[in-house]
Image (tube, helix red, strand yellow):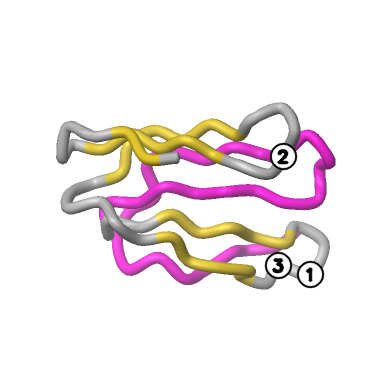
Amino acid sequence: MRTLSGHASLVTEVAVYADGKRSISASADHTLKVWDLESGLELRTLSGHAHWVTAVAVYAEGKRAISGSWDDTLKV
């Protein structure tokens, strides 16, 4: 098992990509993070929300994700 650390505040949501190799987490720190589940490494941080990110889903093709925030926006 691995512990994935990197968010500066609580994690509110997580989704796993269909390939089972990556996940994406949403946080109260206003960011999303993409993770490599095999290595536990953070692949990238996605920013742009002005408030807590509370929802995330991955598109079936695995190239995009959509997030929802308390800032009243969805971002793709």
Query: Where residue 13 sits: x, y (%)?
Result: 44, 38
Q: Nearer the viewer, mark 2 or mark 3?
A: 2
Query: Where residue 52 sits: x, y (%)?
Result: 23, 46
Q: Quadrant of the image for the N terminus?
A: bottom right
Query: Where residue 73 sits: x, y (%)?
Result: 24, 34
Q: Secondary structure at mark 1?
A: loop
Q: Is residue 33 magenta?
A: no
For the residues labelled 1 and 2, the Cα–Cα distance comes to 19 Å
**Left/right of residue 57 with respect to residue 26 in the rendered view:** right
Q: Secondary structure at mark 3?
A: loop
The answer to whether marks 1 and 3 mark residues whose Cβ atoms lie closer than 8 Å is yes
**Left/right of residue 50 with respect to residue 69 in the rendered view:** left
Disc on the earlier residue, 1 or 2 = 1
Residue stretch in magenta: 1-28
User: 46 above or below 68?
Assistant: below
Q: Quadrant of the image for the C terminus?
A: top left
The answer to whether marks 1 and 2 mark residues whose Cβ atoms lie closer than 8 Å is no
Q: Nearer the viewer, mark 1 or mark 2?
A: 2
The residue that mark 3 highlights is 40
Q: Amino acid at mark 3?
A: Gly
User: 20 above or below 2?
Assistant: above
Q: Residue at x 47, y 35 (%)?
A: 66
Query: Mark number for residue 62?
Result: 2
Q: Secondary structure at mark 2?
A: loop
Q: Residue at x 71, y 27 (%)?
A: 60
Mark 3 neighbour class, 10 Å CA radius: few under 14, some 14 to 19, many 20 or more: some
